[in-house]
Image (cartoon, grey):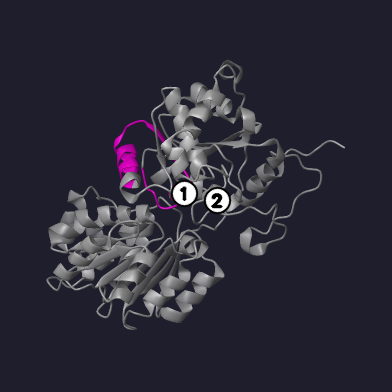
Amino acid sequence: MSSFAELGLKNDLVAALEKAGFVEPTEVQSKCIPEAVKGKELLVKSKTGTGKTLAFLTPILEKLERGTHSVSAIILAPTRELALQIESVAEGIARPLGYRVLTVYGGVSLNPQIESLRHGIDIVVGTPGRVLDLIERGDLNLHRVKFMVLDEADIMLDMGFIDDCEKIIEQTPEEKQMMMFSATIPIKIKSIASTYMHNVTYVDMNTDETSIVENIEHNYAISSSSYKFSTILAYLSKYKPKKAIVFTNTQRSASMLNHILHSQSINSAVLHGGMTQQKRRIAIDRFRASPEGMLIATNVAARGIDIMDVGDIINFDAPEDPIVYIHRVGRTARMQNSGRAFTIFGYDQRDLIYDIEEFCRIKFRKVDLDIEKFKGVDFGREISKFRESYEYKSLGGRNFGRDRDRGSSNYRGPRRDNRSRGGFRRGPNRRPGGERQQQ
């Protein structure tokens, strides 16, 4: 389809979409919207960055009854950032049509959310924990819901939210239209679909859980822990990424790296689950609005954050699980743009290089970096200054590097013949990077 008008949508909705900057539907939108408008429930498997948000919002807005201001649609998302992102898209289209949208999530006061619900809301976007809290308090009634969406359903499963989701589903009428969107469809998600959904249309965008968009260049370097700061500075010096997300495995590691980069006059901001929601939102908004800079983040940003102009993903800490690598690098090369990924592996993580290559079906390229010119930087002094800071003490002070955001995976070594996770076996006498070792 070359336009939303060709999908048979109402004129005022098409006008609202065009005013918000949406003129031509993506492939997933072209496949999902007509089916959903017909009333079919959808189980959609699609990569991140393909336009899934509009694929479920558009049919809801096409069919939603106007003027009731009672909760008619509920959209669940695994993280606050994704919920707010969905809200930002929904507001731009729904408000001109007369619909009210509210986002609810934890980490902030309940009172403003409760007050908004009392004044009447058409669409609620929220994280499962806060939605369930509002239901149990009697402040959110879902008995009139006609549409329900589970976005990034597989990550909600990974983060332990799926039981909450089922409790929320049970608070909605049986006669409603459900849509589930996910980059992967594990058995538990299929079970929920078969239990709660009827007349299901399965939309598979020709992807599987191990797929990564082809237009990403995958680079790596190997470094000891004492030279990781020199390594990342050498990479930044050589490749000069304009806008990048840098991933770490812990909150303190993210904050410390942010401190180190600032000491080198590099523009960066930090994002992790130990920050207040206000600070997290400010960090994302500033990063999204800036034409350049870096966002230092834990895995809280690995799913759902849709920032179109991120050119580079840097794994300062290598992901402990190959599937986490997929989620992280999915933040670049959005909507058919090209991207670049760089990962720093430790000398004890050579097996992980090969595992990621096999599981993700990619080929790493080792890059040569001049770390010598950064060995004179007194990182020890900067680390000491950071450990004396309030920020470090607020994150626990001791046990440095053990604080993980909810949802972080723990890698337990290579998976052998695990069919649900890619079904690969380690080849004989293989070197990390895919080269066969000479006997």
SS at mark 1 in the image: loop
Query: Is 164 placed above or below 287 here?
Result: below
Picture coordinates of residue 165, whole percent (x, y): 41, 71
Q: Nearer the viewer, residue 371 or 136?
A: 136
Q: Which residue is mark 2?
A: 324
Q: Which residue is mark 1?
A: 302
Picture coordinates of residue 169, whole percent (x, y): 38, 76
Amino acid type at circle 2 is Val
The image quadrant that residue 193 belongs to is: bottom left
Span of residues in magenta: 281-307
* Quadrant, the C terminus: top right
Tell which circle, 1 or 2, labels the residue nearer the N-terminal end: 1
Q: Residue at x 23, y 72 (%)?
A: 71
The image quadrant that residue 110 belongs to is: bottom left
User: In the rendered structure, are the residues bearing label 1 and label 2 in contact, judged by CB atoms less than 8 Å apart?
Assistant: yes
Q: Residue at x 48, y 39 (%)?
A: 254
Picture coordinates of residue 305, whole percent (x, y): 39, 49
Marks 1 and 2, how far apart at CA: 8 Å
For disc 1, the neighbor class at 10 Å (few under 14, some 14 to 19, many from 20) is many
Query: Is 302 placed above or below 235 here?
Result: below
